[in-house]
Each structure stands twice: as C-alpha cells, then as structure tokens.
Image (tube, rainbow, N blue to C red):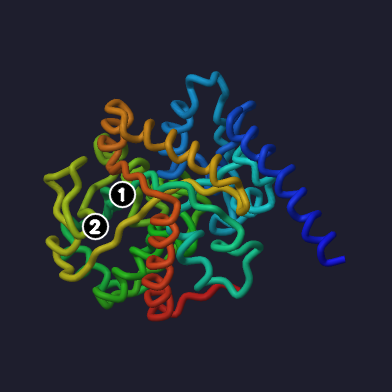
Amino acid sequence: MAAAFCRCGVYLALILLPAAAIAAASFPARSMRLVVPFAPGGSADFVARLVALRMFESSGKQVVVDNRGGASGMIGNEIVARAAPDGYTLTVGTLGPFAVNSSLFDRMPYDPVADFAPVSLTGTASHILVTHPGLPVKSVTDLIALARSKPGELAFASSGIGNATHLSGELFKFLAKVEIVHVPYKGGGPAMSDLVGGQVALSFASMPSALPHVRSGRLRAIAVSAGRRSAAIPELQTVAESGLPGFASEDWQGILAPARTPRAIIALIGAELQRVLMSQDVGEKLIAAGFEARTSTPDAFAEMMRIETAKWARVVSAAGIKVH
C-alpha cells in the first residue's frame, strides 16, 4: 500500500509539473486584474494605474485596475486571498493591510503572511503634513502650539484606520504630546476632498494625492514625514527639522499574489515590474508624485514586511489603538 501511495505521488508530480511549466510559458494568456484595496485617488491607486498601463504591454493583454476599498484594505485583499493562485489576480500591498492590521484587529478574514505570495516592492514614499489654508500655521512648531491651545478641537484625516497616514498622525500625537482627533476615510481621495473643503484641519497625506492641491494653493504643505527631504519637493523641511525631533514615518507599496501561485509566474511578474519601474518615463512620473521606485525579490519583500509588522506593532500598542 505504501509503495502504491508513493508511486501515485510521483505520477501526480509528473503530471502537475508540466502543467505549471506550460502555464508559465504562456503567461499571460488573458487579461489580469490588479486589485487596489482602497478608493480611487490615493497613492496606491496612482501607482497601480501607472504600472498597470505598462505591464505586459508587448503581450497585448490588459492589466485592469479594480478598486475595492473598505475595512482598512481587507475587503479588496480578501478577494485576492481567495482568488485562484494563477497570477491573474494580484493586489497592491501597503503598510496598513500587510504590516499593521494584524495588531489592530482581533480577527481578520485572511492571514497576511500565509494567504499571500509577495512578488516585489514597487516603491516607497514620504507623506506630506498638509493643512487647510485657513489654519493659522506655517510650521510644525506652529501646529503643535495651536493643538495644545485647542486640545481635541483639531481633526486629522487619514485614508483608513491603521495605514501609514493614520499611524503618522498617531506618532505625531505621541511625540508632540497633543490631542487631535482622527477621522478615517475609505481612501486618500475622499480624505483630500474633505481637507480641501475644510471639514478637517490637517493630514499626513500621500504625495500623489496631496501635491496637486499644494501646487494649486488649495492646501498648505508644512513638512514631509520621512527622515530625509523628498526629491519631489526638496525645499520642504522634514517634520523633525520643522519642530518635532525624532519623528520619521514612510510608506511603502508592493505587489502580492495569492499563496501557492507558481514561483515561475511570480518571477515573470516580478521581472515585468522591474522593467516598468526602472523605465525612465515611469521613474520620472513617480518622482514628480513624490514616490521613489524600488523593486525587490519575493524573499526580500517578505522579510521587509516581517520587520515592519514588528516595528508598527510597538506603535499601535503605545497608542492604544484597537479595532474590534
């Protein structure tokens, strides 16, 4: 019986191996879907659409961007976690859903490690601390002074609970010892709309969603969130330089597939991402939007997510954030 079982396993492997090889050789044979687990208008949407337009262009197959916002990115990501592991359904992975949600939520509809196969990073980005022009502040020092004089009266917008725009605000509150109210939205677009309209006072917004409003004068840029200045707006100080030493926060994005997607297909997608992201025109558009293109191996991406998960778990714990 054991010998028969062993022979069956060998036969099955011989059958499946050619099938996987054939699938990789003909990939992509049809249109692909790239899920953005946030509303249109934010940084994840911006980068996804830029990359999707150029991916596998020589094959004549489209990469269709599908916005599925809600539940801090979990609605869209669950779709991908449950999709067939054939490389035709991918997700845009960001800091919140893949490094923070596990610390925020008692239960999640998927496991961010076990249910996904990392493909590659697509880049990193600083955020801009922006305020409505009606707010009488021009520096981080001004903002801290105003917040301390009006505890609980100022509100900051984020593109969802637990993502980088939210955690940057929580880190700011903790280090500056101020009380400002968090208002989460279902993406960067809606958050920017209410900030421009004056419904909220400030935000640590993504550069792609904030820069057009800054350049038009509808928002005021106060500082960048990372530990270094941005090439997209080098004249703007960091938060640390502008009045809050020790502050540094940066977002990242990458592409993930469902777990058990064949490694050969993962490699094909990763190589295509590298080709697109390293092209001059795409690189220039990303820099203009405040985004720095960056690629990685699947293993390096997985290790970075592990490190980021541990780092932000400490921030979540210190801030006492929990979603039930």
Among the 4 quarters of the image, the one containing residue 273: top left
Q: Is residue 173 above or below residue 125?
A: below
Please tell me which residue is depicted at 69% across the width and 38% down the height of the picture.
Answer: 19
Among the 4 quarters of the image, the one containing residue 139: bottom left
* Residue linked to disc 2: 226
Q: Residues within 10 Å of mark 1 (few under 14, many from 20)?
A: many
Q: Which mark is residue 65?
A: none
Q: Is residue 77 above or below residue 292?
A: below
Residue farthest to the right? Answer: 1
Would you say residue 194 is visible in this rendering?
Answer: no
Between 110 and 27, the residue placed more toward the observer is 27
Q: Position of residue 249 (x, y in %)?
A: 29, 61
Would residue 315 appear left or right of 56 to someone viewing this image?
left
Amino acid carrying mark 2 in the image: Ala
Between 299 and 116, the residue placed more toward the observer is 299
Q: Earlier in the sequence, mark 2 or mark 1?
A: 1
Please tell me which residue is depicted at 34% across the width and 63% down the height of the picture.
Answer: 168
Q: Residues within 10 Å of mark 2 (few under 14, many from 20)?
A: many
What quarter of the picture does the C terminus occupy?
Answer: bottom right
Q: Which mark is residue 125?
A: 1
Between 188 and 119, the residue placed more toward the observer is 119
Please tell me which residue is depicted at 25% across the width and 75% down the height of the picture.
Answer: 175
